[in-house]
Image: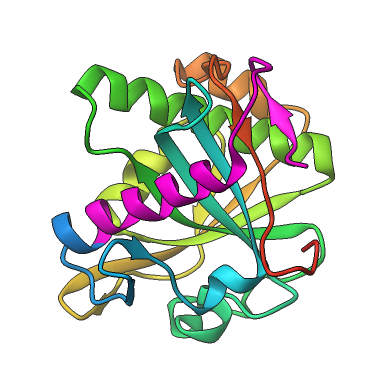
Amino acid sequence: MPEEIGEQIEVDEDGAMRAMFRARKEVFIDLLKWDLPVLANEFEVDQFDTQAEYLILLEEGVRHRASTRLLRTDQSHLLGDLYPHLCAGPVPTGPTIREITRFCLDRHQRASERRSARNQLVTALAEHALATGITAYTGVAEQEWFEQIRRFGWECEALGQPVVHEGRRLIALHIRVNDETIGRLQASGVYEAPRMMLAAPRIGGTGR
């Protein structure tokens, strides 16, 4: 069963997962033109989805609004496997560190709805970490998106200098999560309690 944050409503887990993978294709492949695998010409799924957990912001139990994938850093993950050169030092890893990937805001929303969905998902990331013992998040972001992430208010720092990779300026980032994180998000105006169902299902049959 998924972990539930926010409003308690019945959720179609399979439908929510399909909606998330479909939204990821629409954003990362159709819009951003990333070179990623496509399943059944409809879903964006890669090798890391076999060992991931997800936070999915839903409306009415199934409509995708926003989502992100979390990968354990003591196992195979993007920064450690594909982008270690973005770090000036060792890649941060450990059982209480998760990598944020595929931060996805559904395209079928007005700008104000996307901003609200973004804020709710950022809030959920902080609350999920505090509830489950996660002490930090890592990730890879384009420089413009990294600057936005830093302005959210939480403790976020670059792990190295920007590196141009396939025409994109990428930065590895590290976010610390502690008892001050929620207050910092509130002070920046980003904190927004999730009003819809937010699920964290796991796939791959490993419970990871």
Location of residue 2 with respect to 184 vertically, above or below: below
Location of residue 105 with respect to 30 vertically, above or below: above
Residue 117: say if magenta.
no
Q: Quadrant of residue 3?
A: top right
The answer to whether residue 153 shows anywhere in this view is: no
Number of residue marks: 0
The answer to whether residue 163 shows anywhere in this view is: yes
Where does the N terminus fall, quadrant-wise? top right
Location of residue 4 with respect to 166 vertically, above or below: above
Q: Position of residue 63 (x, y in %)?
A: 41, 30
x 37%, y 70%: residue: 161
x 76%, y 49%: residue: 135
Q: Position of residue 73 (x, y in %)?
A: 69, 70
In this view of the protein, which residue sits in the foreground, 155 or 81? 81
Residue 26: say if magenta.
yes
Left or right: 41 in relation to 139 = left
x 20%, y 70%: residue: 168
In this view of the protein, which residue sits in the foreground, 135 or 131? 131
Q: Position of residue 101 (x, y in %)?
A: 48, 59
Location of residue 40 with respect to 58 vertically, above or below: below
Q: Quadrant of residue 178?
A: top right
Tell me which segment is drawn in magenta.
Answer: 1-28
Q: Quadrant of residue 90?
A: bottom right
x 24%, y 68%: residue: 169
Q: Position of residue 17 (x, y in %)?
A: 51, 49
Where does the C terminus fall, quadrant-wise? bottom right
Question: How is the rendered protein coloured?
Answer: rainbow
Left or right: 115 in relation to 183 = left
